[in-house]
């Protein structure tokens, strides 16, 4: 290799001729940069044009370089550029089918890539390095096996390869076409070739000093972008010309065929006692050796077997592919028949350790990449394997100094055998039961409890469980600290069901958010977190709501969360995080967003607590609401509502503008079925009923996030059901009062004429008594006491879930005791009573002249019989329900309506009639 780089020499000459403001290293570095750091192609081309403008063949070379930059890697274009302006072309050590070459630059790049890839390969084969460092004392059999495995690498890794002009050969060696072993053994393979190994090591050291760590990604990116299938095959065809490479490939093929294991398994140092060709030295007859010499030979081979190396006198029996259970991972051994029986007995006591250790290595290899928990557990097992290798290395050193016997080895390894057996059994159970993520942690946690009598094995399983739980506890920490889920392998106990963006929320997003946005996956909960899964779920939910309110989630102290089965410190961390999030969200709802103020406004309007406003609104909207619902103008109702709000005492309410009018496409009975049975699709498909505006009218209350979590669409619908029943009863009461005032003229009638109206006035009074007592019962005996209980409990509430539960209990209790549940059917009876009262009012108001006595009296009598029959049936239903559930307050309504036992005899007769027939 020449001392002066020919490419840099050509560039230096051109810069000197043109007096351009560039230097050689700047040009080379710009052409070798990656796409992100590289200048645009036009700037690279302008740089070459500037330094070569004075050359006579400038136009021809310029056109060629411009075309090369568009189609190939910039570094290749620089090589072609330097070749065109060099005298006689760039030097090369091998003549291929091309006229121009650029071997010096290519050699430098190949060396740098080889060095970088060797560095990256070290990280993936750290176990191999550990084993090699631990096994410095092994005998020539193991040494020859490893050297045979190293012979795979090409012996000419540092040779100079020229670039053909008409092929897409990359300017650097493809990373994915090499194995890590190629670079680790290249120096020894080329050691007898003019110091190639030393030159390679020297170039790698210089490269490490000059380049930063990021250059590896730079080189890889440029190589991967430049290499095509054709160039890769061309490179392999060039590399395959070397005889040493052919023999190495043949050796590798034989090795794979004999072991039946893929290449990636061997990178994890899974020896598994497979046969390695190359050790052809003759072995002594074990039976011809004295017992002491036999012991040394057997000790040496036994130590090799403990690390998975195949030997001659202690041989692993090939596993049965059809074996099931633990036998899939166990290894059996056969001893040479000429080994002394006493030595064989001692060896048989140690060989289970080799089976356990190799079984652990098999399981680690098979389970690699099966989730974060498994990977973390495998990492802990790799550290354990490293300690085991150190133990074997110490034993080899003792053997080297003739201080080790089989008795000593068995004595020293006896505790290790117990521990390894426990670890192997645990891992085999995990693999055979196909445990993943949380199931692995649950198994290890239960295993720790069962090992109370074995302190050493328990401590080791505790360490493995801590290490395996680290990624799970990191996810848990993110969730309870920030409300964030980072779970690529779907291992965490909380699942985020959000499939839309925050800016594209559906109409009733708040209804489903609390229950459906975040859910717990029961099969992903470790047993030690099962009791706290609800707190964990709510903690993250609270933090997410706080974040969506624009508040910054900042814990008050540093959170150290790790799995500790001995002290369970993670429980206190989870509790602290939960109480922090609960208090913070409760403060956001109650203080910053005034939840109680909104609830007071809802009660004031939707539960008719604002008496003057209700009466003024009914006076203003009576004519409009008496029309058919299709003829009612919603804008008119909104205007009248706004006017009434500002004329009544409600004008001081800060949330009065959140109240709006709504015309529903169904009556109260239909809405009640819709809410209670959740059959919204069915009711939406029904045709619009022929209803009046009064029957379809309801108030609605609109709030913003996060108050909409409490006053969501379902809660407002329940308020509307209470409002519509109260509003309808209030309307009936007003109509009955109206006919009382209009019929005051009957006082001027003669006694004979006034007699005709006496029965009608009596019926009107009975109707008024029933409707007023029904209103009093719902508003005073049901809503007010339940509201008072709700307010008192809200004073000591601790979290938002309690707020939601208390609010839902308040609404459900009011609906049930106001007879607005589908199971009771009492609301239909109330609706029929109100209907007959309105029909009676219409009859009285539209009667302009006195009909014959029998006609008027008969019509009043029919109204009387129909109303009395409906009322008695209603009271009888309440009596039957009160017998089944004495906790309900329905009997209070019976006592109010039947205060003088006027209907008792008729109720008794009806009961007897039902009993007899």
Image (tube, rainbow, N blue to C red):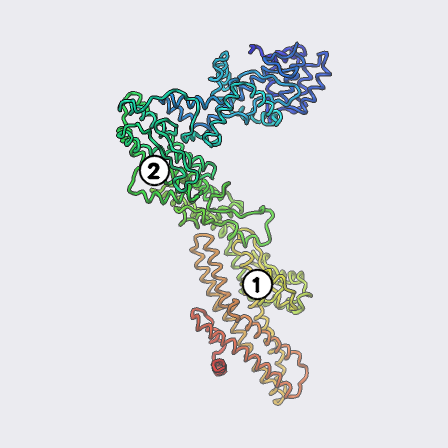
Q: Quadrant of residue 240?
A: top right
**Residue at the spot x=52%, y=52% of the render?**
516
352 lies left or right of 102: left
Label 2 vs label 1: CA separation?
Answer: 63 Å
Across and down, in percent, residue 796 comes to: 42, 55
**Residue at the spot x=53%, y=65% of the render?**
609
Q: In terms of secondary structure, where does tag 2 sit?
A: helix
Determine crowd level at label 1: few under 14, some 14-19, many 20+ residues with C-alpha closer than 10 A.
Answer: some
Across and down, in percent, residue 117 comes to: 51, 24
**Residue at the spot x=45%, y=38% of the render?**
367
> Is residue 557 visible to us here?
no
Between 135 and 25, the one lying in front of the other is: 135
The answer to which of marks 2 and 1 sits earlier in the sequence is 2
Between 834 and 150, the one lying in front of the other is: 150
Which label number is shown at residue 421? 2
Across and down, in percent, residue 518 comes to: 50, 49
């Amino acid at each position: 290799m020449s001392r002066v780089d020919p490419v840099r020499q050509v560039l230096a000459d051109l810069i000197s001729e043109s007096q351009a403001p560039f230097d050689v290293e700047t040009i080379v570095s710009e052409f070798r940069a990656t796409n992100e750091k590289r200048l645009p192609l036009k700037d690279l081309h302008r740089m070459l044009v500037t330094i070569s403008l004075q050359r006579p063949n400038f136009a021809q070379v310029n056109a060629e370089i411009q075309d090369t930059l568009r189609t190939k890697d910039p570094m290749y274009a620089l090589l072609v550029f330097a070749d065109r302006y060099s005298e006689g072309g760039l030097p090369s050590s091998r003549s291929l089918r091309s006229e121009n070459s650029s071997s010096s630059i290519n050699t430098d790049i190949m060396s740098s890539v080889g060095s970088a890839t060797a560095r990256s390969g070290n990280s993936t084969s750290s176990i191999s390095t550990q084993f090699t460092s631990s096994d410095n004392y092994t005998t020539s059999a193991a040494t020859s096996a490893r050297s045979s495995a190293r012979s795979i690498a090409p012996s000419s890794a540092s040779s100079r390869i020229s670039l053909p002009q008409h092929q897409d050969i990359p300017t650097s060696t493809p990373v994915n076409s090499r194995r890590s072993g190629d670079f680790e053994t290249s120096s020894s393979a080329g050691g007898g070739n003019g110091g190639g190994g030393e030159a390679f090591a020297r170039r790698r050291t210089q490269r490490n000093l000059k380049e930063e760590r990021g250059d590896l990604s730079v080189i890889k990116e440029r190589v991967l972008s430049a290499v095509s299938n054709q160039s890769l095959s061309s490179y392999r065809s060039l590399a395959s010309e070397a005889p040493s490479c052919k023999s190495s490939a043949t050796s590798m093929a034989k090795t794979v065929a004999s072991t039946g294991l893929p290449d990636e398994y061997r990178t994890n140092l899974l020896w598994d006692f497979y046969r390695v060709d190359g050790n052809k030295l003759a072995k002594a007859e074990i039976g011809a050796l004295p017992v002491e010499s036999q012991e040394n030979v057997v000790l040496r081979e036994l130590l090799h077997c403990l690390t998975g190396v195949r030997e001659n006198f202690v041989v692993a029996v090939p596993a049965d592919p059809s074996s099931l259970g633990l036998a899939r991972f166990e290894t059996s051994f056969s001893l040479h028949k000429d080994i002394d029986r006493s030595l064989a007995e001692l060896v048989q006591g140690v060989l289970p350790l080799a089976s356990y250790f190799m079984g652990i290595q098999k399981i680690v290899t098979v389970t690699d990449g099966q989730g974060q928990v498994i990977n973390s557990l495998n990492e802990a097992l790799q550290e354990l394997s490293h300690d085991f290798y150190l133990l074997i290395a110490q034993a080899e050193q003792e053997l080297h100094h003739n201080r080790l016997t089989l008795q000593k080895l068995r004595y020293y390894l006896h505790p290790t055998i117990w521990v390894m057996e426990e670890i192997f059994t645990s891992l085999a159970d995990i693999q055979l039961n196909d445990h993943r993520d949380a199931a692995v942690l649950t198994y290890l946690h239960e295993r720790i409890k069962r090992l109370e009598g074995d302190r050493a094995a328990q401590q080791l399983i505790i360490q493995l469980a801590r290490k395996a739980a680290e990624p799970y506890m990191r996810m848990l920490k993110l969730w309870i600290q920030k409300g964030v889920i980072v779970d690529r392998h779907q291992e965490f106990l909380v699942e985020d069901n959000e499939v839309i963006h925050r800016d594209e929320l559906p109409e009733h997003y708040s209804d489903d958010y609390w229950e459906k946005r975040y859910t717990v996956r029961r099969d992903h909960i470790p047993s030690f977190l099962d009791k706290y899964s609800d707190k964990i779920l709510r903690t993250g939910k609270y933090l997410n709501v706080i974040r969506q309110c624009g508040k910054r989630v900042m814990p008050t102290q540093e959170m150290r969360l790790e799995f500790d089965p001995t002290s369970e410190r993670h429980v206190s961390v989870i509790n602290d995080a939960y109480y922090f999030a609960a208090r913070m969200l409760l403060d956001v709802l109650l203080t910053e967003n005034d939840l109680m103020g909104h609830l007071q406004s809802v009660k004031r309007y939707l539960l008719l607590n604002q008496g003057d406003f209700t009466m003024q609104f009914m006076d203003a909207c009576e004519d409009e609401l008496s029309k058919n619902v299709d003829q009612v103008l919603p804008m008119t109702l909104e205007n009248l509502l706004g006017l009434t709000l500002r004329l009544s005492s409600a004008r001081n309410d800060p949330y009065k503008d959140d109240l709006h009018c709504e015309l529903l496409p169904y009556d109260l009975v239909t809405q009640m079925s819709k809410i209670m049975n959740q059959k919204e699709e069915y009711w939406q498909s029904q045709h619009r009923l022929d209803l009046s505006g009064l029957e379809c009218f309801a108030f609605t209350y609109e709030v913003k996030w996060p108050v909409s979590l409490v006053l969501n669409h379902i809660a407002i619908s329940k308020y509307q059901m209470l409002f519509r029943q109260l509003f309808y009863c209030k309307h009936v009461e007003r109509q009955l009062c109206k006919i009382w005032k209009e019929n005051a003229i009957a006082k001027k009638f003669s006694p004979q004429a006034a007699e005709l109206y006496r029965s009608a006035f009596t019926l009107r009074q009975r109707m008024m008594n029933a409707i007023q007592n029904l209103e009093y019962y719902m508003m005073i005996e049901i809503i007010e006491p339940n509201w008072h209980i709700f307010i008192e409990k809200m004073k000591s509430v601790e979290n938002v879930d309690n707020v939601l539960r208390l609010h839902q209990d308040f609404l459900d209790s009011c609906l049930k005791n106001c007879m607005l549940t589908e199971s009771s059917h009492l609301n239909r009876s109330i609706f029929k009573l109100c209907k007959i009262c309105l029909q009676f009012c219409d009859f009285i108001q539209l009667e302009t002249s006195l009909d014959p006595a029998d006609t008027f009296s008969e019509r009043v009598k029919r109204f009387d019989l129909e109303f009395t029959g409906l009322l008695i049936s209603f009271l009888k239903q309440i009596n039957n329900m009160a017998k089944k559930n004495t906790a309900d307050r329905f009997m209070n309504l019976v006592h109010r309506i039947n205060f003088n036992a006027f209907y008792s005899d008729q109720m008794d007769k009806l009961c007897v009639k039902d009993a007899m027939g």
